[in-house]
Amino acid sequence: MLVSGSGSNLQALLDAAEDPAYGAEVVAVGADRPGIEGLARAERRGVPTFVARVGDFASRDAWDESLLEQVSRFEPDLVVSAGFMKLVGPRFLGRYEGRYINTHNALLPAFAGMHGPRDALAYGVKLAGATLHFVDSGVDTGAIIAQVAVPVLDDDTEDSLLERIKVAERRQLVDTVGRMAREGWTVNERKVRLGRG
């Protein structure tokens, strides 16, 4: 799992994985900066961690290669980006495309990028939400795995809407990752289907 901040989505997955019936486990947690709560959450659970800071490398390509090497040491079936605020490069995607997923705080394809809730409020939508999608070479353009809608209230601020989205986003992430681990998935063009049948 890759994180950049407090790791609340990570914590939800760690909690879910305590139940053997969940079907998935967090094998390692990587971050793009040291000293963050996401790493501390993993360490408290005895989950291996690593840090790959972009500034420690001569180029983005060198960083991408290092990130790929560090993630690959743990042989994950699925790589989860949960608040990981860095775009991976072609080497990483070449190995993990179709197995690298990201959670985004808007209903894609609307409001891609860093400010989904703010952009949704500014546009005046009545429904916001969260999207779980595969990562590709674009920004929030990969095939959509799952979505959950969150109503926009008349008195919402960016912060109040974001907090409600986070609750729905965590629940969706935990439910969907568990299903992917237990049941598998297929992708036909842009259509993602959970389950082997």
Image (cartoon, rainbow, N blue to C red):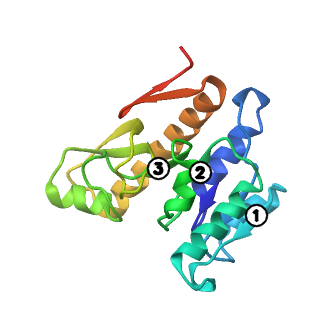
**Lower position in the chain sequence, tag 3 or tag 1:** 1
Q: Position of residue 21 (x, y in %)?
A: 74, 26
What kind of element bears circle 3?
strand
Residue 157 visible (yes or no): no
Is residue 3 rendered to the left or right of residue 187? right
Numbered mark located on residue 95 in the image: 2
Q: Position of residue 114 (x, y in %)?
A: 36, 65
Is residue 27 rendered to the left or right of residue 143? right
Numbered mark located on residue 49 in the image: 1
Is residue 80 rendered to the left or right of residue 115? right
| Amino acid type indicated by mark 2 | Arg
Write the residue at 66% across / 52% down.
11
Answer above or below: position of 54 versus 46: below
| Amino acid type indicated by mark 1 | Thr
Write the residue at 62% across / 78% down.
53
What kind of element bears circle 2?
helix
Residue furthest left as drawn = 124
| Amino acid type indicated by mark 3 | Thr
**Lower position in the chain sequence, tag 2 or tag 1:** 1
According to the picture, the residue beneath numbered tag 3 turns out to be: 103
**Lower position in the chain sequence, tag 2 or tag 3:** 2
**Which of 119/188 is in front?**
188
Rate crowding at label 3 as few (under 14), some (14 to 19) or many (20 or more) other CA atoms within 10 Å: many
Residue 99 visible (yes or no): yes
What kind of element bears circle 1?
strand
Q: Position of residue 68 (x, y in %)?
A: 64, 61
Structural distance between the alpha carbons of marks 2 and 1: 20 Å
Structural distance between the alpha carbons of marks 2 and 3: 20 Å
**Which of 44/107 is in front?**
107
Rate crowding at label 1 as few (under 14), some (14 to 19) or many (20 or more) other CA atoms within 10 Å: some
Numbered mark located on residue 33 in the image: none
